């Protein structure tokens, strides 16, 4: 197979959204699968809306997802001179021409087409006229000469054979009257100069492909292969919007999702390998091919993503998960404050509690919440449901268990459990009637990691201090 070169070409007018992330991932996996190269092009020709902050957000989102690229990013606006050069070359070849139609004339064309219920297209009035007829004071645009007979065929790896009759194409603008190139021209020239052999992008660009082929054919260039991916819809089947989850990739990190879980979820949005749902990065690279991309729109499902994320949290090795958790804290709501409260001692305690905490967590936010009992200060704020366990009977139970716990020779999960079980049996109580008030006292909640793990992790002094606070004992 010849060297395969793909490209991911986002516009820096906003965040890296899920659709863009999937396009980047599909390009990345395909090039890794075939041993090719993926290039990154920042299409920043919209100078009013393109921002440095958006560029930074896109690069950060790609890096977080583990998607890298070959070489340095190419910035499209910086190549405007080259784009203009191609426009002029097309004029010299007789494949494009200067159009002097005025705004009033263009408006008249539109109105006439609407009245006659025809598509609104430029009527080609300057296609064969001599520039000497140009009216004074009109800065011309350059239009490419679209073929007027026959058909243009695109054999798309996803959509199949797609045909457009050339009479449906118009002589579209490739260079504006102020000398700035249009998107359609810039994309074609950049793909050619960057050596792109395979274009993988959303199917909202399928119509663009036919217009871009006009320029490619006019220049005598070889067209790349195409794979136009169906868009992503929300669970209700409507086009994905912010209410469905069409927010920036950075927002998913802030919601506590793991990058590898996001990658696994995104790759299954419109692509499949048999019945495989959970797959490693190596498996994705080994299995990914364009044939596996479906023609139907994928549906984004938050519940499925959350469940998948929970799977990854539970199955990620503790040291790796702990490092990821600490790295992500600056991005989580309340994370910076939680990190500041993690003294070296409490950080060690959290790492020790992690195996128990992660069993209940579906996100890193829930992981942080599960370890919150380590960072609170005495006296604890008690949640209402936990306060109900600390009624007169609950406080009496706490007061009674303090002495035997204090007398324990050692302080670990087994020893504290033995003491509490013995106290419950001697008091004629079920274990839960003693353990639940203890849980409420030492965590302020009704749910936590196993209570004897919690006691061991907190240590004798801190655990007994919290119990005394709620028992009203000195």
Image: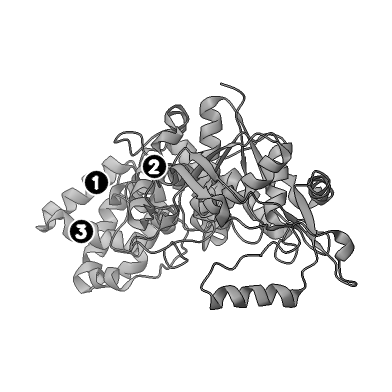
Residue farthest to the top, as pictured: 1
Q: Position of residue 168 (x, y in %)?
A: 55, 56
Question: Regarding mark 3 in the picture, which secondary structure is present there?
Answer: helix
- What colouring does the structure picture have? one colour
Earlier in the chain: of badge 1 and badge 3, it is: 1
Q: CA distance from mark 3 to mark 2?
A: 34 Å
Q: Which mark is residue 337?
A: none
- Mark 1 and mark 3: Cα distance apart in space: 11 Å
Q: Residue at x 57, y 50 (%)?
A: 166
Mark 3 residue crowding within 10 angstroms, few (<14) / some (14–19) / many (20+): many
> Which x, y percent locates residue 158?
44, 41
How packed is label 1: few (under 14 Cα within 10 Å), some, or many (20 or more)?
many
Q: Is residue 296 left or right of residue 106?
A: left
Q: Quadrant of residue 400?
A: bottom left
Circle 1 residue: 417
| Foreground: disc 3 or disc 2 | 2
Q: Identify the residue position indicated by label 3 in the image.
A: 434
Give the label on residue 312, or none: 2
Label 1: state its secondary structure: helix
């Amino acid at each position: 197979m010849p060297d395969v070169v793909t490209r991911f070409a986002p516009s820096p007018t906003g965040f890296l959204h899920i659709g863009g992330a999937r396009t980047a991932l599909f390009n990345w996996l395909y090039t890794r699968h075939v041993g090719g190269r993926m290039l990154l092009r920042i299409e920043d020709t919209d100078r009013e809306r393109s921002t440095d902050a958006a560029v930074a957000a896109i690069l950060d989102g790609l890096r977080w997802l583990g998607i890298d690229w070959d070489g340095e990013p190419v910035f499209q606006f910086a190549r405007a001179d080259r784009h203009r050069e191609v426009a002029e070359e097309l004029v010299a070849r007789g494949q494009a021409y200067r159009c002097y139609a005025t705004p009033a004339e263009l408006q008249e064309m539109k109105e006439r087409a609407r009245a006659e219920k025809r598509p609104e297209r430029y009527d080609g009035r300057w296609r064969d006229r001599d520039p000497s007829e140009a009216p004074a004071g009109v800065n011309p645009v350059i239009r490419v000469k679209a073929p007027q007979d026959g058909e243009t065929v695109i054999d798309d790896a996803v959509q199949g054979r797609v045909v457009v009759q050339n009479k449906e194409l118009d002589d579209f603008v490739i260079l504006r009257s102020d000398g700035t190139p249009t998107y359609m021209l810039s994309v074609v020239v950049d793909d050619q100069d960057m050596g792109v052999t395979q274009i993988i992008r959303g199917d909202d660009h399928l119509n663009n492909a036919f217009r871009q082929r006009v320029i490619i054919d006019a220049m005598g260039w070889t067209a790349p292969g195409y794979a136009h991916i169906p868009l992503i819809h929300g669970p209700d089947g409507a086009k994905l919007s912010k209410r469905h989850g069409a927010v920036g990739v950075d927002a998913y990190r802030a919601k506590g999702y793991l990058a590898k879980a996001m990658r696994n979820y995104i790759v299954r949005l419109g692509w499949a390998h048999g019945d495989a749902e959970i797959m490693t990065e190596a498996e994705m690279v080994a299995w990914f091919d364009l044939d596996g991309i479906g023609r139907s729109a994928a549906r984004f499902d938050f519940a499925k993503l959350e469940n998948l994320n929970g799977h990854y949290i539970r199955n990620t090795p503790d040291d790796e998960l702990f490092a990821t958790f600490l790295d992500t804290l600056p991005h989580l709501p309340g994370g910076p404050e939680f990190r500041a409260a993690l003294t070296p001692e409490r950080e060690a305690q959290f790492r020790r509690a992690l195996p128990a905490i992660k069993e209940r967590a579906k996100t890193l936010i829930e992981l942080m919440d599960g370890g919150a009992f380590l960072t609170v200060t005495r006296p604890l704020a008690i949640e209402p449901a936990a306060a109900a366990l600390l009624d007169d009977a609950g406080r009496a139970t706490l007061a009674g268990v303090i002495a035997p716990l204090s007398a324990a020779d050692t302080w670990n999960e087994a020893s504290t459990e033995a003491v509490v079980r013995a106290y419950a049996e001697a008091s004629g109580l079920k274990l839960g009637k003693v353990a639940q008030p203890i849980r409420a006292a030492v965590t302020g909640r009704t749910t936590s990691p196993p209570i004897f793990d919690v006691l061991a992790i907190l240590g004798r002094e801190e655990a007994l201090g919290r119990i005394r606070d709620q028992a009203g004992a000195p």
